[in-house]
Image (spheres, coloured by chain):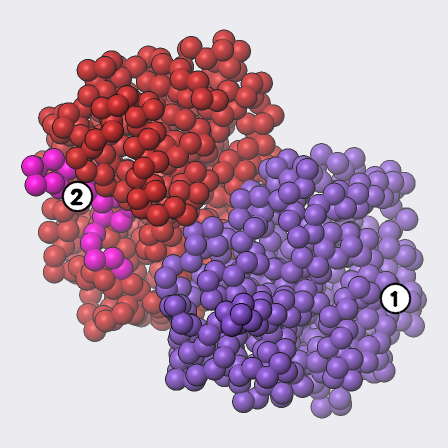
Chain colours: A red, B purple
Amino acid sequence: MADVDYCVVGAGFAGLTAALRLKQAGRSVALLEARDRVGGRTFTVTRDDGSWIDRGGAWVGPGQDRIHALMDEFGVPEYKQNHDGDAMMIVDGKKHRYGGTIPWSMSPWAVTNLGVGLTVLEEMCKAVPRESPWEAKKADEWDRISLAEWIEKNSLSKQAREMLDMALAGTYTSAASETSLLWMLTQMGSGGGPGFVIGGKGGAQDARPVGGMGAIYRPMAAELVDALHLSQPVQQISQDADGVTVSAADVTVRARRVIVAIPLAIATSIVYEPALPVDRAFLHQRMPSGAVIKVSVIYDEPFWRADGFSGQSSSPNSPATLTIDACTDTADPGIMCIITEGPAARRLTKLDEAERKAVFIGELVDRFGSKAKTPLELHEQNWTVERYSGGGMIGHAPTGVLTQFGYTLRPPCGRVHWAGTESSAVMCGWIDGAVRSGERAASEVMAAETAAVS
Amino acid sequence: MADVDYCVVGAGFAGLTAALRLKQAGRSVALLEARDRVGGRTFTVTRDDGSWIDRGGAWVGPGQDRIHALMDEFGVPEYKQNHDGDAMMIVDGKKHRYGGTIPWSMSPWAVTNLGVGLTVLEEMCKAVPRESPWEAKKADEWDRISLAEWIEKNSLSKQAREMLDMALAGTYTSAASETSLLWMLTQMGSGGGPGFVIGGKGGAQDARPVGGMGAIYRPMAAELVDALHLSQPVQQISQDADGVTVSAADVTVRARRVIVAIPLAIATSIVYEPALPVDRAFLHQRMPSGAVIKVSVIYDEPFWRADGFSGQSSSPNSPATLTIDACTDTADPGIMCIITEGPAARRLTKLDEAERKAVFIGELVDRFGSKAKTPLELHEQNWTVERYSGGGMIGHAPTGVLTQFGYTLRPPCGRVHWAGTESSAVMCGWIDGAVRSGERAASEVMAAETAAVS
């Protein structure tokens, strides 16, 4: 039985940050993690040659001040994502090669429509209050329909529809029919709108930490080495008048308060005593995770760059929904990343590993030529089947959930506090949002302490 | 370690039926139930005077052949639900007293619109294939929007909208914005359409078993007494080439196959080894339960009958969404039942028991006069907070779920078979559907056995 000031459940960026801030404030902490590693939905593997692969969350962008603050704290510089060269979009088997964000070689009809769609969405995002999207003037209207319905009613061409579907629903790694329009506006709005999400340069894929995300989470974990318990899935959280008892496989923690920093989709796996207030318990049943496979393919060199490609390509509904250059700052070796999302990722999960590998390489050869045929290595991370993520990349709210249950995302339930990127009103769904949520939760428990004393 | 032919998880009507049919076919069975009682989402309490209260599911209706077969098997007669007298609908504080299904004292505009809405829905239900709703011609279109969106776009008056909302969304004990239109059509269609659901006489509230549901499930449990293990929440199901190992709190069962007959919303609480196929695992994250409180108020006599009331009343969004006469076949004592659903039930859950009691009695006095003021007893069953139901009455599919994941509702995952009313293509959501699902699953495991032998 460990007896500490505070317990933190989950050692992804949200939990690591919460525990770190508490320790830095002089509090004793126990940090329980179900996996045998820290990092949560980020996971950096370092190769023998010093290059690294981010098998999960990887990018940072402007406005993500809190992850940048952590990078400064631990002396981790960033480097710019490669955006030089042409991108590619494949629709109905036809390749459109283009510079910039929008594939201008598509039909003018499609491009115009796409541009109009994004402009309208930017304005809608601005109409959603960050802290309380359920109070938007049109909250009910926007939470009654799925993103798919909005796209259907606002796309005048099949091409524009497919691209909007991929660019928007892709973020939730689910079918567009599964996601509430209001959720999409809330999540994208929390990062500044669809321009930030879709834009690479100056957007959500602007830069990466040198050394990968592990260069940040490893020193955080090192500072928390005495607090950290790995391979300890939490089974029960009991609260009473004086504190909480958190029971994991081999360790029990007694603390004044607990911060739960795990994905909503797996928050149901913990038994809460007494039961959580019903609206919060129901939220746990109602924010599922999506499906995503991230594949890193290692080559001698980034040959696509020499051929004038940025490495970025998109092909809606294909087994390689997106590709993106994932080289380190030295561009040696060449690392090409495939991100397959939603229904396509679920279909691929039914194949065996060798079949998937053949499919992935086939897609790369089709897009970037025969040099893609002979990689040195292929690293596949299927977040879809990760028990302790419940899927990937992030949770989403189906229709009706934000307006009915959204208000429970942040407020504590007695001595149980909540963190995790989905609970962040700013940069919700990004690593920066996770960091913000951890800092908020750490402040909350300490504020409660002050309130109790005064 | 119990070693049996088959293990069944969950002793509601689905699990009880599966276990019973297997035993009757000469197979050995272990039946594991998390609660300290059988019945699942039905729960009959017998009073000292021999009268009974159905604290959960209570009614049977025409077309529900399989629950009727069980009643015949155990010699349980039925009696008709009282529909004599006027019903009442309260909209904006105004009481509309009426005979029949539709409150004709409402504005002709509202009534016409309501009637048209129901007629349209009847036709739409017919266009949904029972076994494969995701193959309906308009499946994508209907699964992209919530029931709330359909009501909004198809109601020409506020009164009609409120009544449609209550009558339709009420079935799912959730906000109409949470439920997919396709799910609603599928579920209602499985019972014959909205006429069956809304209609009392000749519909889903046509009759009740004498003695309540317990008169059926108790003799079923008695036949299974050697197989039944109460208070055994299942923690893990492991399958291998030869069979399954089912681990509960104090008992481990080894069997050839297992039938899981628990609500989808709590199916995530079991660890499956190896992990379930991703689409089925994701289904478990995506079919939440709703909120419902059922209150039985006991009076000396059914005084409302003498006053010309049937006992049936409805008041959208009020703390007593519905009331209905719940007397036994002798009509002695008087039993009035309040069913509060969805957001209203969740709001009530935040009050304490005494506050809720005052609210309930206040509603009855308002509708049925001062005689309602002095009940003999009040029995409250809040399914919303039942850990081993995950809520009530049934699970629902949000938008996008049936078209993406619906196909996983019935097929087994290796040696793990699925039962539960939500998996029934006929009478989905009713007790009859649970019985059908149990019989289907029992047939499945025995058919697999034959296939293995031949």
Judged by its main secondary structure, the magenta piece is loop
Q: Nearer the viewer, residue A195 or A253?
A: A195
**Residue B84 x/y as whole percent:** 91, 67
Residue at image position (71%, 60%) is B427
Q: Dot 1 falls on which chain?
A: B
Above or below residue B387? Residue A396 is above
**Residue A227 falls left or right of residue A109:** left
Residue B373 magenta: no
Above or below residue B4? Residue A359 is above
Q: Which amino acid does label 2 sit on?
A: Val
The residue wearing badge 2 is A45
**Residue A151 x/y as whole percent:** 55, 27
The residue wearing badge 1 is B83
Q: Do the residues labelled 1 and 2 touch (CB within 8 Å)?
A: no
Instruction: Determine crowd level at label 2: few under 14, some 14-19, many 20+ residues with C-alpha closer than 10 A.
Output: some
Q: Identify the image quadrant of residue A295.
A: top left
